[in-house]
Amino acid sequence: MSTELEDSNVTRGKMRILLVGNYEPDQQQSMTRYAQWLLNSLKARGCTVLLMRPAPWFSRLAMGPLRKAAVIKYLGYLDKYLIFPKQLRTAAQQFDLVHICDHSNSMYLAAMAGVPAVITCHDLLAIRSARGEFAATQTGWSGRLLQAWILRGLKRARNVICVSHKTEEDLLRLTGRKAGQSGAQVTVIFNPLNWGYKPQPEMPEALRVRLGLAAGEAFFLHVGGNQ
């Protein structure tokens, strides 16, 4: 994506904010929705906003027998960690603030070159898993290196938004910070709903039958990944 302020995805406004989104081939739908929500909300408030993501360049080179998930993943690392930080460093200089929308991209904080930045921390389950906190899950060696890198970036972050108090608790513990520590600000801001949800007087009959629920039967709604 272009980083020029004349880009069609940018609107003129009071404050210039660069949003850093996720690599699209990773298909992280929740992070895509979160970044898009920030983009729309900040535009509605009159800010000048650009949403920037790593472009899939190396990963597109995987053709024929190389078109395998593992190969694409490692080529994607070149797109995300070799090419993009240089592009981000240049683009950031045009903005008043950079907001990294996903804590898994905390390594990009090193590319700010003095531009104020904030990062949203959604949960630290992957980092905790890589550190052996969950006996039921195993993280490979490359995954452990990646999660350690992410944690180092979070330790460097001066301004962090946590989406829950549990995430804040984990962040403070794993980074060795203390609440209210001088020189660093950790704030809890809950995620909004990304749809116009509202209570229904009763479950539609067709939906109840499709879900295999008896009339009046209680159910548990799970929202999230199944890990």
Image (cartoon, helix red, strand yellow):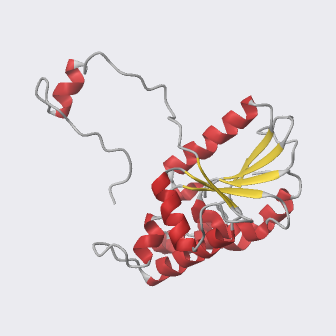
131 vs 216: above or below? below
Which residue sits at x=51%, y=34%?
Answer: 194
Which residue sits at x=43%, y=71%?
Answer: 128
* Front in this rendered view, residue 13 or 54: 13
* Front in this rendered view, residue 1 or 214: 214
Residue 155 horizontal/vertical position (percent): 64, 72
Residue sticking out furthest to the top = 201
Q: Quadrant of residue 112?
A: bottom right
Which residue sits at x=51%, y=70%?
Answer: 173
* Front in this rendered view, residue 184 or 150: 184
| Lateral position of residue 119 relative to residue 74, left or right | right
| Lateral position of residue 133 relative to residue 108, left or right | left
- State the count of labels: 0
Q: Quadrant of the C terminus?
A: bottom left
Inspect this view and state whether residue 63 appears: no
Residue 163 horizontal/vertical position (percent): 53, 50
Residue 179 horizontal/vertical position (percent): 60, 62
Residue 20 horizontal/vertical position (percent): 69, 54
